[in-house]
Image: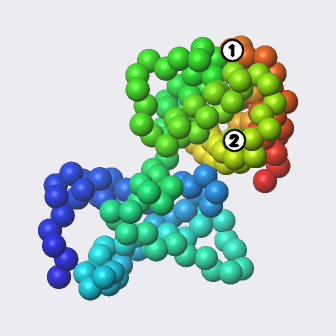
Amino acid sequence: MLPEPKTGNLMRRKEILKKGLLYHAVHGLCRIDRMIQQNHSGEKVLCYSLVPNIGNQMRIRFIIGTHDLEASGFHTLISIKEANEILDYFKTGASRAAQTHPAWTLAQNILSFSLEGAVSKDQRKRQVLKYSAKGLVGELAFVLKTTLKQASEKIQDNLRKTSKVNLVVTSALVEAADD
């Protein structure tokens, strides 16, 4: 028998289950297949069983503990309103409120890199940029029901209003649209 979760966790778990979809910047859109119990260090832990939305031959499945969801990189999708707010953020460089959703972190990474102007030689920063571009382009495309290319172009168009064209950022966004 599992210990009774705190009310806040129970509410969040019901919200996640109701929507049935989670997003990851690398693995893309996944659906919650079911909830399962697993033993971890002698304790029973409730876990999400996630299956990528795009069928694959290897039958990949992710098993994520409900308490480890945030650390795993999986998150609920942003709303259409939030997607448009992110695009506006690229235009203005400022958001109206502090945002905590992981998609906002991806957007902040892209804008920050774009504003740097110079081409960074730091390989880790480039990897963060590629990860952020791939994740945000994919999530915006799904939420706004557009292609990856259209989502990438929307980000690029809006970025041009706040910063000069940064070839590294442009390249990362184009590459994200090609996946």
- Local secondary structure at mark 2: helix
Label 1: how many Cα within 10 Å (few below 14, some 14–19, many 20+): some
Q: Which mark is residue 162?
A: 1
What residue lies at 60% left-to-right and 64% top-to-bottom? 53
| Residue 46 as seen in the image, left or right of residue 100 | left
Q: Which residue is mark 2?
A: 125
**Residue 84 seen in render:** no
103 to 98, vertically: above or below? below
Q: Are marks 1 and 2 in contact (CB under 8 Å)?
A: no
Position of residue 81 measured from the top left corner of the image (x, y, whole percent): 49, 30
Estimate the x, y position of residue 38 in percent, counting from the top left.
34, 82
For the point 68% across and 81% down, which residue is it?
58
Q: Quadrant of the N terminus?
A: bottom left
| Residue 135 screen position, x and y as percent | 63, 47
Separation of marks 1 and 2 at Cα, in angstroms: 20 Å
**For the point 59% across and 17% down, which residue is it?**
93
In the image, 24: left or right of 20?
right
Q: Single out the mark in the foreground, 1 or 2.
A: 2
The residue located at (26%, 81%) in the rendering is 44
